[in-house]
Image (cartoon, rainbow, N blue to C red):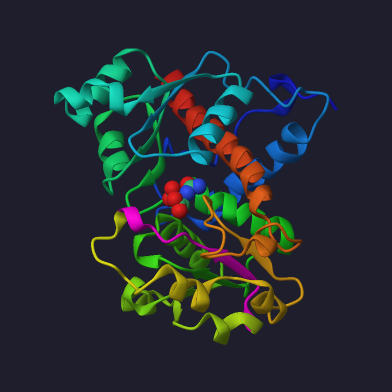
Amino acid sequence: MLYTPANWGSAPLEWTREHLLGLADLSVEEITIILDQAQRFRSCILESSENSRAIPLLAGKTIVNLFFENSTRTKTSFGLAGRRLGANVVDFASSTSSLSKGETLIDTAKNIQAMGLDAIVMRHSCPGAPKLLASRLKDCVVVNAGDGAYEHPTQGLLDLLTIRRRFGSFKDLTVALVGDIAHSRVARSNIFALLKLGAKPIVCGPSTLISPYWRELGVEISYSLDDILPRVDVFNLLRIQFERQVTRPFPSIREYARLYAMDADRLARCKKDVLILAPGPINRGVEITPDVADGPHSAILDQVTNGIATRMATLWLTISAMSRRLAAR
Ligand code: NCD
């Protein structure tokens, strides 16, 4: 079937949020709406040959990528998602902007907004930066593409979509997040959502990288990957975020890999249908060995495709909610 904005239908009215700042804020119903729409974009648009993989639902809208930290997948996939929805996407390069001349973030954003933008996709090293921006900007969607070590909602959602496509639901699924939990915004977004959806999250890694506070939220803590291998359905293998660490959390990378790398030997002790995820970039030989990363249990590249679908859903839902409000004024 050939999809057009006319036969695709309008965005679900139950979705009313104009910003996506974190998964801690979302209800199960809201998470389900995004995942359902992302699944629809994936199967009807991204996997379609008829539509040249695009549908102009956001024609005439302008989205700016405001990234103050490095990014490969996230920035590219927000850009592709916006373009596949027919929006204009502009990349803002923070290193060459007036921020290096002393301009505040709010002033930069106000200036960008005065250029007539519909959405800002923001990555920043300070937790809460996208929330601050959302509270100050009028009539402009803000999507958090990662704020420091706090949240990375679209990564969490694309992980959820990858899990749901494999297992059908989240109820009673045991999902282990392994690695640098302390500095991982991916871990936080995953945990906040998994708890709401009825899954059983486990955080696993060196004790120097896991706060005991997770127990209070109902998250299991394990310092031994070998102990949990046979009872986990999904492993999400996180990178050691050296760039955020102020002290060395363990003696050597070799020792870390010996205890926590997912390799063929450990994989053989996992459930037969175990799913291996990683947000990327992966460090081959550290958190995952190449044979596992490229093997049949790995959904790492499927996550990248789901990332475009999830970001299409996020941009469409938030921008549509804002457009509805503005049209009713
Ligand atoms: C993650 C991030 O930036 O938080 N990567 C990503 O968005 N694909 C994880 C990481 O950098 O390790």
Which image quadrant: the C terminus?
top left
Position of residue 64 relative to residue 191, above or below, is: above
User: Can you give x and y, in whole percent of width and height, for residue 228 in the image?
Assistant: 57, 83
Position of residue 168 relative to residue 91, above or below, is: below
In the rendered structure, which segment of residues is drawn in magenta? 231-243
Q: Residue at x 61, y 81 (%)?
A: 229
Q: Residue at x 67, y 58 (%)?
A: 164
Magenta region includes residue 241: yes
User: Can you give x and y, in whole percent of width and height, for residue 119 in the image?
Assistant: 42, 26
User: Can you give x and y, in whole percent of width and height, for residue 292 in the image?
Assistant: 67, 64
Which image quadrant: the N terminus?
top right
Count of labels shown? 0
Front in this rendered view, residue 17 or 306: 306
Position of residue 40 relative to residue 265, above or below, is: above
User: Can you give x and y, in whole percent of width and height, for residue 128 in the image?
Assistant: 28, 46
Front in this rendered view, residue 14 or 221: 221
Q: Residue furthest right?
A: 1
Kindly indicate the quadrant of the structure image that contains residue 226: bottom right
- Answer yes or no: is residue 164 visible: yes
Left or right of 20? Residue 136 is left
Left or right of 186? Residue 246 is left
Magenta region includes residue 259: no
Q: Residue at x 39, y 52 (%)?
A: 151
Front in this rendered view, residue 156 or 289: 289
Position of residue 237 relative to residue 7, above or below, is: below
- Answer yes or no: is residue 199 visible: no
Q: Residue furthest bottom?
A: 227
Q: Residue at x 69, y 60 (%)?
A: 298
Left or right of 55? Residue 193 is left
